[in-house]
Image (tube, rainbow, N blue to C red):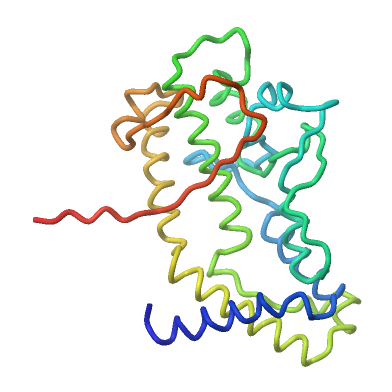
Amino acid sequence: MNSELKIVDDFLNNYIQKNNKQKSNIFLRLNEVEYYEENKSGTLCHFPGCGDVAIDSHTYPKSFLRKIAGGNKVFATDIKHIVGNSYDVGVSDLVKDTHIKKSGIQPLFCKKHDADIFKAIEVKNINTNLETYLCLFLYRSYIYDYQLESEVHNPSVNRKINIDRPYSKKISKEDEIRYLFEQELSTKLISENANFHNSDIIKNKFDAIFLGKETPNYSDFCKYFELKYYDLGFLPNFFASGSIFFPWILKG
């Protein structure tokens, strides 16, 4: 870690430790939530070459969620809630009691592609092999991560105070300077450790698969990815997905 990045890292660690002592700022909370909503709105379908507006797609198949749901509800992450909580001390819930219709949804694909691509994992009467099923789920869960990165961590989108909103007049100059400073440092730290360009590298691999065949099978995914999976022997009551980029350096 270079000296500049260490300064950023030390600052953020110190900030996190002191976070419980700061006062809630409902106006910065509104600004942060609006920033998130603005980046999310108008998202286009992530299928390569499609320019239609994306609908709210589920990360996990609803059939999965129904198996673990209690009264059609599950505990799930609510990104908007998490984003706002960064400026609302005392509200640190990472998961909320959520109806399965609203669980793990993000604007990922248009209505056509969401139905056509993932019918093998959504429609009961369609048979597919386990490997293809897992690869399709991998695609959807990765695009979910990609979408979140574009909403929250995309370095090309600058943070700002929404001065056209009435609440902006309630934000002091001191709070504004601190807010923008913290966000700039956070963006720098994130870009150093998880460059958004890396997200594009993986997405381009998926794009190549689906440009070649709109309904690919396991062998098509194997051209770009290696699948590893394990049988737990039981149905878990908790599901989580995530992605991390490791550059593969060949040594000659």
Q: Position of residue 107 (x, y in %)?
A: 66, 44
Residue lying farthest left? 252
* Relative height, residue 228 to residue 194 (above, below): above
Q: Is residue 128 above or below residue 73?
A: above
Q: Is residue 173 left or right of residue 250?
A: right
Report the residue at 48% width, 48% height from top: 243
Q: Is residue 119 left or right of residue 176?
A: left
Residue 206 sits in quarter: top left
Residue 81, by quadrant, is bottom right
Looking at the picture, tell me which residue is in the foreground, 109 or 234. 234
State the quadrant of the C terminus. Answer: bottom left
Kindly give the residue lying farthest to the bottom in the view shown: 174
Q: Identify whether 69 is placed above or below 140.
A: above
The residue lying at 60 percent from left, 53 percent from top is 148
* Quadrant assignment for the N terminus: bottom left
Query: Picture coordinates of residue 67 (x, y %)?
Result: 71, 21
**Horizontal side, residue 226 vs residue 239: left or right:** left
Viewer-proximal residue among 142 and 16: 16
Instruction: Identify which residue is drawn at 45% across, 26% down.
Output: 214
| Horizontal and vertical percent position of residue 71 | 85, 26
Q: Nearer the viewer, residue 153 or 209?
A: 153
